Amino acid sequence: MFKKILIANRGEIACRIARTANKMGIPTVAVYSDADKYGRHVRACDEAVYLGPSPAKESYLVIDKLVSACRRLGADAVHPGYGFLSENAAFARALADAGITFIGPNPEVIRLMGDKILANRAAKDAGVPTVPGYWDSIASVEDAIKIGYDIGFPVMLKAAAGGGGKGIRIAHDEAELRDAFRLATSEAKSAFGDDRVFIEKYIEQPRHIEIQILGDKHGNVIHLNERECSIQRRHQKVIEEAPSPFLDSATRAEMGARAAALARKCGYDSAGTCEFIVDQRRNYYFLEMNTRLQVEHSVTEFVHGIDLVEWMIRIAAGEELTLKQEAMIPHGWAIESRIYAEDPNRKFMPSTGRLVRYREPRESAEVRVDSGVYEGGEISMFYDPMIAKVTTWGRDRDEAIAIMRRALDEMYIKGVHHNIAFLTALMASPRFLQGRLSTNFIAEEFPDGFSPAPLETEELDNIIAVSMLMHLRYMYRAMRVSGQMPGYARRIEPRWVVVIGNAHYPVSVEAHAGRGSEEGFDVTREGHVLSIRSDWQIGEPVLRCTINGQPQSFKVERAGIDYRLYHLGAEIDVRIYSERVAELSKMMPERKPPDMSKYLVSPMPGLLQSIAVENGERIDAGDELAIVQAMKMENILRAAQPGKVSKIHAKPGDTLAVGQIIIEFE
């Protein structure tokens, strides 16, 4: 077994690998850039090595620095995690030349299967169905357009060295293909140091289903069944589950056998994943093979009860795979939700900044949280926007979803925008609950972007009851501090008005059994009594309670005189008045936001990569104005209406904040 493992990665996956290595008694070495100096993964390892500046191409992607770190600290093995150099054959070969073991497949299979063009050729040769396409590097946009017409639109451009949804663009016509080619090659170069792209036919309404494989150096290969990864946005997976609610047993067995046969033929010797797209008739086509650990490996671990990272380490050390195919029967159901730093209410724009508050749900036999962040830490613009991933297990799919909804309600993040409300809304979608999924699910279910659904009457009542409990707890504290504590229960004003948006909800309140706020209240609205009980204390971000005997969880905070509650995908601001103040509040004038129509402002924090216009230039609606790069994705900003540029306020290379002015128009 290895004496010391260097983890050539950061964040959540580095912490995940360190946890297994620690369980096996193997010391670990972390690596970090300027942005990650105080990273959680640095503390999770026994030693740490500084790599360089924050951009990945100057730190995490520099092979010589990683090899040198291994030599300096005596690491005899490297685990690459996912992303960065995890599918880089040159990295695996450089380690081998230095006498250091790469915890992953051998360099030849990485070169073969890590290159999407070669992988598709190999799959076709092995008899695995493949998508129609052009499996060679495309030299120019004109070549791409010719191929697009030959194959037939829509088409998908994909980075040859890609993964993780980077360097992928869909084009429905020639105009879109021109933009897609430019952005896909640029993103591929930035993310992987390789700007080659290829084209394949875009299959509409597909499912994304992948097969987990495991092979050793002795010729043994098994598959650990499938994961359904169809809930995606911009080709980035959002929710994954195992097993798939769509596959029947015959298709499952056939896909698993084909994936294992392909792995066996190419000499695969580690954990890996064969990804397929599956149409509505359960016809499946090879998509790519990821020669690394997947982000969503946790769902497979839950349903099979094994540690994939441990097996990667053991296989790399030369041990023989003892798991048998006939024993790989999934138990129960597992679902994973990825928590991203993005704002669903603003078209999922990336969000960066400090995690002012960070609380994870309670872990248990049914709930697992993998993260690489901590309260007070920074979400950087330089890396992937994933904050954490939450995985839940249930005896069946419905139970796993119910546990996930409770876990998401208990996860509290403040300081950056996040997608927890969106994930909770997905979990409540009737179509999701029925398992009617496709990679177009999010675009079809939220065509105008995400906005929380209106509250049902029962949930509105619960929000009102919880808000009143919070308000009276704050009043209770104020009375105690001011010395008005005696006779507190009798001093409580019985009538209040709860204001949500522009709606006023009159309620009456009665302290429970004379105990005041220490136990709870009975809140009455329109004749309906809500009996709320909780031991919640001011300052706790998660409020657990019972309402009419039913357990509930809410994320809560106070914002000035308002109370903000997060529950089942909704974010609700509540203000509570006495009856008289509520009447007066209706007379207050509405404050209007400033007119920003004559400015182009940055919709996200990021790096201004280019500006396409000059001072005095006239523009039309739809013209490209600028490109902002954020979290490894490039975003074109276009003109919303005709106009004339009067002043350019920023230059390429500037780091932009949300709302920062880039261009001013006459």
Image: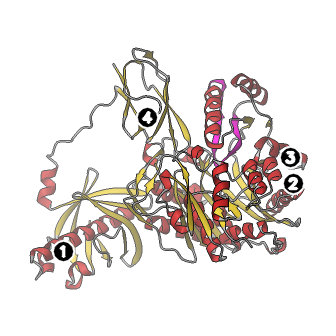
Q: Nearer the viewer, mark 3 or mark 2?
A: 2
Q: Amino acid at mark 2?
A: Cys
Write down the residue under mark 2.
Answer: 266
Q: Which mark is residue 654?
A: 4
What residue range appears in magenta? 155-175
**Quadrant where the N terminus is found in the figure:** bottom right
- Does residue 178 appear left or right of residue 477 in this picture? right
In three-dimensional space, the C-alpha distance between marks 2 and 4, rounded to whole angstroms, equals 46 Å
Circle 4 Cα neighbour tier, 10 Å, few/some/many (<14 / 14–19 / ≥20): some
In three-dimensional space, the C-alpha distance between marks 3 and 2, rounded to whole angstroms, equals 8 Å
Q: Position of residue 2 (x, y in %)?
A: 72, 70
Callout 1–callout 2 Cβ contact below 8 Å = no
- Does residue 130 appear left or right of residue 477 in this picture? right
Q: Which mark is residue 122?
A: 3
In three-dimensional space, the C-alpha distance between marks 1 and 2, rounded to whole angstroms, equals 70 Å
Q: Quadrant of residue 664?
A: top left
Q: Amino acid at mark 4?
A: Asp
N-term-proximal mark, 2 vs 4: 2
Tell whether position 317 is magenta: no
Circle 2 Cα neighbour tier, 10 Å, few/some/many (<14 / 14–19 / ≥20): some
- Does residue 124 appear left or right of residue 386 in this picture? right
**Quadrant where the C terminus is found in the figure:** top left
Q: Does dot 4 land on a helix, a strand or a loop?
A: loop
Q: Which mark is residue 81?
A: none
N-term-proximal mark, 3 vs 2: 3
